Image (spheres, helix red, strand yellow):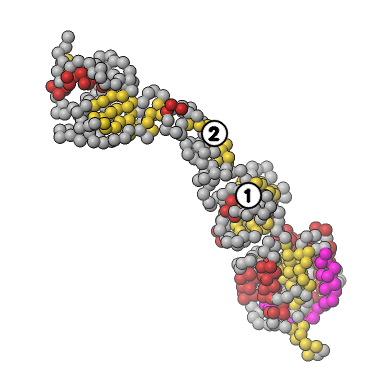
Amino acid sequence: MAVRRSVRECTGFPHLFLLALSLAACSGGGKPEDLPRADVRAAALDLSYQSSHEGTSADLPTADPGAESECEGGSCAADEGSDGTEAVVAGTNCVDPIDWQCVDASRAQRCTLGQIEIHLCGGAEVCEVGVCMPVCPAGTANCTLDPTVGCPIDTNSDPLHCGNCFTKCGDADCVHGACVCASVTQAAANSPLDMFIMMDQSSSMDEATGSGVSKWDAISEALRAFVTDAGSAGIGVGIQYFPIITGSFIFTSESCDVADYAQAETAIKVLPGNATAIINSMAAHGPNGNTPTHPALQGAVNFARSHAMANPTHTVVVVLATDGEPTECDPQDIPTIAGVASTAAGGTPAILTFVVGVGSSLSSMDQIAFGGGTQKAFVVDQGGNVTQQFTAALQAIEGKALGCTYAIPAPNPVGQAINYEKVNVQVTLTGALPVQEGYVASPADCGATGGWYYDAPAQPNKILLCPVTCTAVTGDPKAKVDILLGCWRSDKPPDTHG
């Protein structure tokens, strides 16, 4: 039988760091029956300790803590031992850690009465926060730090532990381990459209068209057709004319006063109810005077802005219908007039200006339309069918003005306050899966990927699509736009934050 001697003599180590239970046999002889056994598979540990001896944990010998040890030939020989859960390393004079801490995924340790206790996890366990927890099958978890309960949590469906422990879905549902917001989907509805038409009644409108009638008569017929068309029902239309003739008899002149044009001769009201008033108004006017475009346009956008502020859920646009260049009232330069339209388009509420040009002297009309946020003027060829072209232009304006502006739907139940940070826009194009468009703070933030924005972020009334998204929607006759209520916007924290 081998002679038992101290581990110091046997190994030559200058101090004692015993990682395995049965190393105690080398330090005093005999079996350490008073120490608990462990189901252990490793012996080398980095231990926190305080000792007067020199050396590091790298000096520790390696042995099987579940076996008996004898000193044979200058080293500790381990015998087979029984399984257990804990081991004690004596003589380390440790002071920490007081609580169990994981050394790695398979081992925990703590300091008790100057001795390091080691707890090694079983084959189906992993060390977490100092506790050997069961290794749970996919889709389950133990979120209690109580290893005795097993893996009771279904992380595929538990809204408090979705995907993993403590991931909360808040108002969302947990589906297949991911938080899916339970939103309310409503088909997007265009916001009510109101048109304020500023109609040119200058003398040049008396010129004949290709069909033989005057431009004025042709446009009058076009406007009559538009306001009585069943497709125009629900649109608000009002009208004013320029120039406004002031004075009487031979002492007349064209008004250059913006205030005169900042009011409607026929107020904006919904078609078809307002159709007769519009037709009668046109019949009471005729070509006369010059073309004071600047005060007319400034007055029109001022009126439209006031109307929009009084009707915040409506989309309000100006339609400038003219047959030529400015000839009355300064300033008459096109950049300044285009600047009026640009200021209106960039204001709050934003007022777009559409331009319908009739005739051949129209080189500046595109510049005004571009400034007004509508890119290009609608040009009516005087030599063609003016009535048909003008009607088509008004219908196109209706489509462009409405195509990408939507009302914010009322919440369900009615009366409940809307959280505007929990509104999303979903677009479904023909043959494609639904896509949730990204939110941007303003039109200036619209980029190549498209998206949507509010008309007034602080107190929104309407939803507008960015140009790229708008082009895709208006170019697809079967495109579907939905408004989703109840889920965080893309720029806000997800519902997984609780």
Q: Which mark is residue 355?
A: none
User: Where in the figure is residue 298, as x and y percent of width and height?
Assistant: 67, 75
Which amino acid type is shown beneath numbered disc 2?
A: Asn
Q: Which mark is residue 485?
A: 1
Q: Secondary structure at mark 1?
A: strand
Which amino acid type is shown beneath numbered disc 1?
A: Leu
Q: Residue at x 81, y 78 (%)?
A: 287
Rendered view: 198 above or below 33 = below
Q: Nearer the viewer, residue 317 or 490?
A: 490
Residue 486 appears in the picture as rendered: yes
Q: Nearer the viewer, residue 343 or 149?
A: 149
Does residue 488 belong to the magenta stretch? no
Does residue 279 belong to the magenta stretch? yes
Q: Residue at x 76, y 68 (%)?
A: 268
> On the picture, is 438 further left or further right than 52?
right
Rendered view: 181 above or below 449 = above
User: Where in the figure is residue 279, as x and y percent of width and height?
Assistant: 84, 70
Q: Secondary structure at mark 2?
A: loop
Q: Which residues are magenta?
A: 273-296
Res. 85 image quadrant: top left
* Residue for badge 2: 156
Res. 243 image quadrant: bottom right
Q: Mark 1 vs mark 2: which is more N-terminal?
A: 2
> On the picture, is 205 further left or further right than 443?
right
> How many residues crowd around disc 1 within 10 Å: few (fewer than 14), some, or many (20 or more)?
many
> How many residues crowd around disc 2 within 10 Å: few (fewer than 14), some, or many (20 or more)?
some
Rendered view: 247 above or below 75 = below
- Distance, label 1 to label 2, CA atoms, is 24 Å
